[in-house]
Image: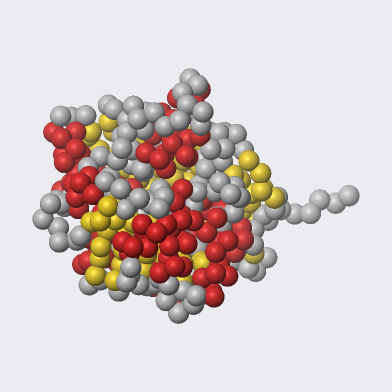
Amino acid sequence: MRIFVLGAGATGSLLAQLLARQGHIVACGDRDPERARLFLGKKSPIPVAEVNARNLWGIVRAARGCHLLVNAGPAVFNEIVLRAALRLRAHYLDMSAHLTRHIFKAEQLRFHKRFQEKNRTAVITAGVAPGLTNLLAKRAAEMLDTVEAVHIRLYESTESEDPISQWSAEGSFDEAVSRPPVYREGRFRLAKRFGEPERFRFPPPIGETTVVLAAQDEVATLPYFLPMREIDVKIGGNEIDRLRRWYRQGKLSRSRGLVRKLFPKTPTPRLVAKLIRRGVLQNARFAVAVLVRGVKNDQPMLIRWDASFPTLYQIRRRGMLTTPIAYATAHLAALFIKHFPRDLAGVYPPEALPAETRQAILADVRSRDFRITMKITRLKKIEDEEL
């Protein structure tokens, strides 16, 4: 396929390189081509055009002739890029939702009929979290007769003296200033920022840590495609601890805007190397847990998936300089594209993809250097009390 990747930062640039290795013809667009070249590498043959993601026709001109348009930039541009894909009669993929038009439903789903009319496919929220988390929740649901609750727990930690954005600065800021959506007793509602702390145990070497509610996209798609009563997402690690501290100090609000000192740009490979040499950045970790509670043959069950990814130290030893989150997200997005369902017209989050597509992606994830384990626990039955 001819693929145009809009946004050549830490994730987009690595994704473009992975797609080129798959044999696709790849080009990139970015508002700052010089900075994009720092991520891609000066010797990379992948071309980079100057494109403003706010300009629909600028995207159309730059991406003309592509079969697939990928938005690897901030999710705030999703709707513009979706419209550009329709103009181009191209397929579409992104890795997150923005949730401004409808806070409880991914904005990309509004384009379902338009993509059906053009006979084109849009795969949305196709990264790790969301993305892989959705696939694991759906796989667990297929093993149960009914699903009661889905609980997603993430761990993001950066061993650094200074703030470093593993996500994009814009994505980190949006998450920090947004009230987390949750789905409880079959209804959506907004919860308190950094609320409902709980102790959660991740596999070694992370262990037990405090996780708190966070604004994540899984809540905005899974309840629409997977019957359940409850879903929430919580995050732990020193990055969320830092945001929680700033929130208590009154430093986080939409009115203040994005403060670069608190939310720096995602570091380029050269800057990552410099921070490591100076001892400012020591290591970084990223892990995911998906817990699905339900019933199978009248027996309450809990299915737990754990996924861990290479640390910054391990990625560095492989000759790469990027964050664990960017590394994992780019690789998962590349797998979604490898198994892209081009015959499926409409807009689909990962959990709504055909079973064979989801199974192929999960099989490829296991064949990579990502560790995924599953544990099934039988829960005690709740006996009816006699009146």
226 to 257, vertically: above or below: below
Residue at the extreme right? 387
- State the image coordinates of residue 357 (x, y, percent, origin top left): 43, 73
Write the residue at 55% across / 34% down. 193
Which is nearer the eye, 347 or 205? 347
- The quadrant holding residue 94 is bottom left
Residue at the extreme bottom? 343
Q: Is residue 249 left or right of residue 362?
A: right
Write the residue at 61% across / 50% down. 102
52 to 4, vertically: above or below: above
- State the image coordinates of residue 99 (x, y, percent, origin top left): 54, 48
Which is nearer the eye, 73 or 320? 73
- The quadrant holding residue 280 is top left
Q: Is residue 331 left or right of residue 213?
A: left
- State the image coordinates of residue 203 (x, y, percent, origin top left): 39, 46
Quadrant of image for the N terminus: bottom left
User: In this figure, which colouring scheme has been used for the structure?
Assistant: secondary structure
Residue at the extreme top? 249
Which is nearer the eye, 312 or 27? 27
- State the image coordinates of residue 329 (x, y, percent, origin top left): 35, 54
**Total marks in image:** 0
Write the residue at 57% across / 37% down. 179
Residue 29 makes an appearance in the image: yes
Residue 289 makes an appearance in the image: no
Write the residue at 56% across / 46% down. 100
